[in-house]
Image (tube, rainbow, N blue to C red):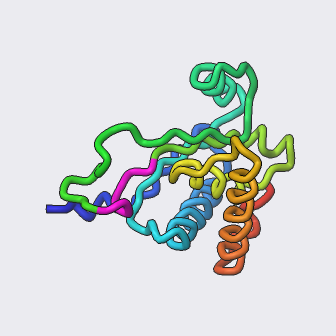
Amino acid sequence: MLDTSEIGRIEIFNLVEVNKNLDRKISLAIKEILKILRLESASLQIFLVNSQQMRALNRRFRNKDRATTILSFEHVGPPNFFEGATDKKSIQLGELHLSLSYIIRNKGNILKLIIHGILHLIGHDHKQDKDAQKMNREENRIYKKVVGSGDFSDIGVV
């Protein structure tokens, strides 16, 4: 039987101890993004890290010795993370690591970066120009819907 207590869980690990209200806003925005993507019951983990932590992750997993705004890690494990799950909507998508200090320094948009990371987790990439254009259109479509659906504008630029 499917354990529904785990479905749709958004976990945020704030390793930089910034405003806890930001955690709540990020969680609500992610739920809205997943709803738009028709993945309401998918689960996701978010790690808010500093530039040094991000640099270490980027070096370890991408062989790039510099910080970046966001890293996405797909869930590794059985295709249906939840026992008894039979559809794509019930899976653990993976992890997003956001470097808030790097985002602030570069005047990045947290909401757009989260959308970007989630799109990577569901299979989008931007290695080829046509794929980058498609991904950019999808990011913008989702961003407009999320901003239009609630009070998420204040998590855009930190």
Counting from the top left corner in percent of width and height, residue 66 is at 75, 24
Asked which quadrant contains residue 4, the reply is: bottom left
Q: What residue is shown at x 53% (from left), y 50% (from top)? A: 123
Q: Nearer the viewer, residue 45 or 60?
A: 60
Q: Residue furthest bottom?
A: 149
Q: On the picture, is 74 further left or further right than 82?
A: right
Q: On the picture, is 83 further left or further right than 136?
A: left
Counting from the top left corner in percent of width and height, residue 72 is at 57, 41
Q: What residue is shown at x 31% (from left), y 62% (from top)? A: 87
The magenta region covers: 87-93
Q: Residue furthest left?
A: 1
Q: Nearer the viewer, residue 64 or 158?
A: 64
Residue 92 belongs to the span the image colors magenta: yes
Asked which quadrant contains residue 53, the reply is: top right
Eyeballing the image, is 43 above or below 94? below
Asked which quadrant contains residue 65, the reply is: top right
Q: What residue is shown at x 20% (from left), y 53% (from top)? A: 83
Counting from the top left corner in percent of width and height, residue 99 is at 69, 39
Question: How many numbered marks does the figure carry?
Answer: 0
Counting from the top left corner in percent of width and height, residue 158 is at 78, 54
Q: Which quadrant: the N terminus?
A: bottom left
Q: Nearer the viewer, residue 114 or 12?
A: 114
Residue 42 belongs to the span the image colors magenta: no
